[in-house]
Image: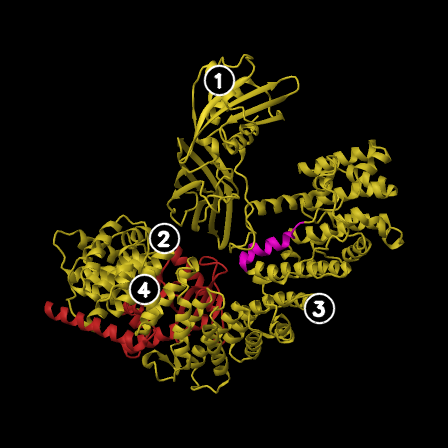
Chain colours: A yellow, B red
Amino acid sequence: MLAGSRPGVGKAATSRRLAPLCSPSPGKSKEAEIKRINKELANIRSKFKGDKALDGYSKKKYVCKLLFIFLLGHDIDFGHMEAVNLLSSNRYTEKQIGYLFISVLVNSNSELIRLINNAIKNDLASRNPTFMGLALHCIANVGSREMAEAFAGEVPKILVAGDTMDSVKQSAALCLLRLYRTSPDLVPMGDWTSRVVHLLNDQHLGVVTAATSLITTLAQKNPEEFKTSVSLAVSRLSRIVTSASTDLQDYTYYFVPAPWLSVKLLRLLQCYPPPEDPAVRGRLTECLETILNKAQEPPKSKKVQHSNAKNAVLFEAISLIIHHDSEPNLLVRACNQLGQFLQHRETNLRYLALESMCTLASSEFSHEAVKTHIDTVINALKTERDVSVRQRAVDLLYAMCDRSNAQQIVAEMLSYLETADYSIREEIVLKVAILAEKYAVDYAWYVDTILNLIRIAGDYVSEEVWYRVIQIVINRDDVQGYAAKTVFEALQAPACHENLVKVGGYILGEFGNLIAGDPRSSPLVQFNLLHSKFHLCSVPTRALLLSTYIKFVNLFPEVKPTIQDVLRGDSQLRNADVELQQRAVEYLRLSTVASTDILATVLEEMPPFPERESSILAKLKKKKGPSTVTDLEDTKRERSVDVNGGPEPAPASASAAVGPSPAVPACCDGLGNNLLLFCSLMSRGVSQPQRAFPKHPRISAGGSEFVCKNNGVLFENQLLQIGLKSEFRQNLGRMFIFYGNKTSTQFLNFTPTPVPRCGLDSLTRTHLNLQTKPVDPTVDGGAQVQQVVNIECVSDFTEAPVLNIQFRYGGTFQNVSVQLPITLNKFFQPTEMSSQDFFQRWKQLSNPQQEVQNIFKAKHPMDTEITKAKIIGFGSALLEEVDPNPANFVGAGIIHTKTSQTGCLLRLEPNLQAQMYRLTLRTSKETVSQRLCELLSQQF
Amino acid sequence: MIQAILVFNNHGKPRLVRFYQHFPEEIQQQIVRETFHLVLKRDDNICNFLEGGSLIGGSDYKLIYRHYATLYFVFCVDSSESELGILDLIQVFVETLDKCFENVCELDLIFHMDKVHYILQEVVMGGMVLETNMNEIVAQIEAQNRLEKSEGGALG
């Protein structure tokens, strides 16, 4: 019956087409549905494969069915060809369904793209506005790189052509925007840009809205080019804001004139600083004031749509005021307006007000004004029914916190934590830990706060948090006694969290002596208390406790026999866990054989930790996405530089903190790991802010091992492996970079970009040209993608380029930066020459600037063959029987750059007895000699 | 930018799914399910915004949704969109559907899936807001209907 339904038009016919597939039949099971769908799929497949050519209508009908089946969640692996055929139909309805199928079902990698592109090309050239519209929609919806390659040149022409219809212009603007988003490099800037700016003056508000979206995105990357849009946007906005609600006819939405366009214009203005021209600036201020005034007027309609639209404009105006951050008067008014919204009965408005206020809190002018709302915000935290809103309240409290209200805010957050939703607990824990540390005047308060955190939400207290409290206690001797007393008391609780046992064990091991005078916390009592928890703990905690015990042996000689008995027990000495067993054996032995002096040295108190950025902060940044946290941190400038209290620790203590003595590896367990973890976070660049300006990324060096070789693994972490293969000839090179996804989850938005790094003089000159194509933005789990980089060396250089990789993995943003091993010596061409020639040239290059010499100690065994291989790998020719001393190595070659060729001679003289080398480089160019000498010296 | 538009009924059955960023089919289905569970457990009178799920977005993305009788309309957007603006856009879309189908109901979305897509295309293009003026949208759809009728007539 399905197949037999007759072609028809209108509602009834369409209904019949799909009815059998989706008739609501409550009695039937899931299997029945699948069976029915498979039957239908088989039917459609046979129709498509059948001998009889299908007419356009039937194709359309079946394609529509396939779309519906796809919607229900079934895979569709055929029909693409039929859809592509529909594109070339002259019938609008057939073309339309063809394009729809392709936009929904064809992904950007499909091989059909070529055919589709052809059809699109024809439709764009058809001058039929309806067909052009369909084609532009399809480009925008698919938005693949292939499409950008094919149409990025054409679409701007359509956009600015004088005879293009409004509706096509509108589509062309957004189509171009989509292409620019996916492949900005393929959209050529040109004289069309100035004409696009003038679309802001267009009669048709739909065109203006689309153009504003386009310009906003373009202006973010090319602010200079679109600077003129500011004054145009201001005057357009001014006309809308001051118009009577009837002026704009259809673009008035529930009595609000053109709300979407207003929002877009206000967004565009947020790409720029406040206008410099006083007239434009005055006009903008007037607009913003009018918008703020309108908020106070009685509503023109009771409908929620009216207030929604009005407030959408208002919130965007407030964002602009905050962004400009220059008019104290407007800022205070904005803050008051938001204050009103904090108590509004509409939940949406309360949510948005909390969110906007969070950015307002970081402005100097309004930080104090925001603080006046603290009670309302705390109340929101306690009474809001919606977790989204409560989360915003937590964010705002965090943002408005400073020394004056830290105690109150931390207390409120702690009490909220007891009932907080599980989903946001970890984040609150991090925030409390950061605030407590940052604004601690009294470190006893800090210790109490962290112990409270562990008590209330122990499971959500990550390692970073408890490592940090230990670091701080160790670095500040005024709090050590209090900390020891407090953890001792906290450990009295019959059931305490394992994290507390860790902190307690560590602190008592270091500072238990400070409370041992009190008979209620005598050494034996301390030991018994800790040991009563021992059996309930996991292996790492038990390992830590064993270290505490050996520290006790040193601190309290009177409990030594008790502890030795414990260590000697079968459950320790014969523990199945290797780590525990080894510790027990070693500590027992240490306590038996070592004299008191040796014990005291080995088990000395931990030296202070070197001050670093709090690893908790790094963790919060990682969790929240970098930009949200850094903003607050950077703008408030209330960094707690004095956490350490005392003078800077001596450099030597840095290594000591990681491992004071090999005999007690356990003492620094957590902390050693912490530093490692922290270093790895830094090298992965996770804590690097997403925006480019605040800080330079930490770059993990690409390793000097690539100086003499071209292939290998460049970088590897838990998620990603990067391999390299490269070849160089004269001043050109080509590098194949392989990115392997080591996880089973997709990477999204995967964008690796190699960029030449800025040397001092790179502002004026480019030394290295790198050309590459973006890779597919999704990398499947376990898959590998390849990127080719074409390299051209323009002139000699020192700084290697950097490979920045950004991607999303499981919802978090990852950022990796590694040095690309493109070094000057890669552009070496070896030159053979006789001994006579060599020394003749050597003498010619006798000018002191032309010679660079380095005498250094051998880092590797001095093996002749390896040395030879390295010199050849370095790129120069290895000249045999040239140097009168056969133990020496000499080499010669030419460094090719686009602008010059530099002849290079090198001589390496090993001194086996002293295990030293002397390396001499002579070239006609000082910078080249210098750089080559540096590079080659690292190799031996 | 709008990353995805999802419409499903109170039982989580998808009724309109449109992605503007490419996801493999099975991920699309997971996103629909995850989003359904996220919005289902929310009361009707709490706020219409929530942080995006784990599959879509990250901290820069929000789900903005409205609940009408039996259907949820969910837009997943990034921070470049105004929350209230999108909320109004959903309203415009639904009002347009209502005009085009004369009192729209869930069955219209099923039986006229193609038409619903065409209406959506007049409102959102490639993840960007194309047109917000309801009369203009309806006029475009009516023009399409006329074209369809004339072609249908020719087929006779």
Pointer 2 chain: A
Q: Is mark 4 on a helix, strand or loop?
A: helix
- Given residues A21 and A658, the one toward you in this image is A658
Tell me the amino acid under the disc marked 2: Ser
- Residue B9 seen: yes
Work out how far the residue at label 1 is from the one at label 4, CA to CA, in angstroms: 65 Å
Pointer 1 chain: A
Q: Is A390 left or right of A649, judged from the image as shown?
A: left
Residue A255 percent coordinates (x, y): 39, 83
Q: Which of marks 1 and 3 is in front?
A: 1
Q: Nearer the viewer, mark 4 or mark 3?
A: 4
Q: What element carries label 1?
A: helix
Q: Which of marks 3 and 2 is nearer the N terminus?
A: 2
Q: Which of marks 1 and 3 is nearer the N terminus?
A: 3
Are dots 4 and 3 on a single chain?
A: yes
Q: Mark 3 points at which residue?
A: A404
Q: Mark 4 points at which residue?
A: A195
Q: Name the residue under label 2.
A: A183
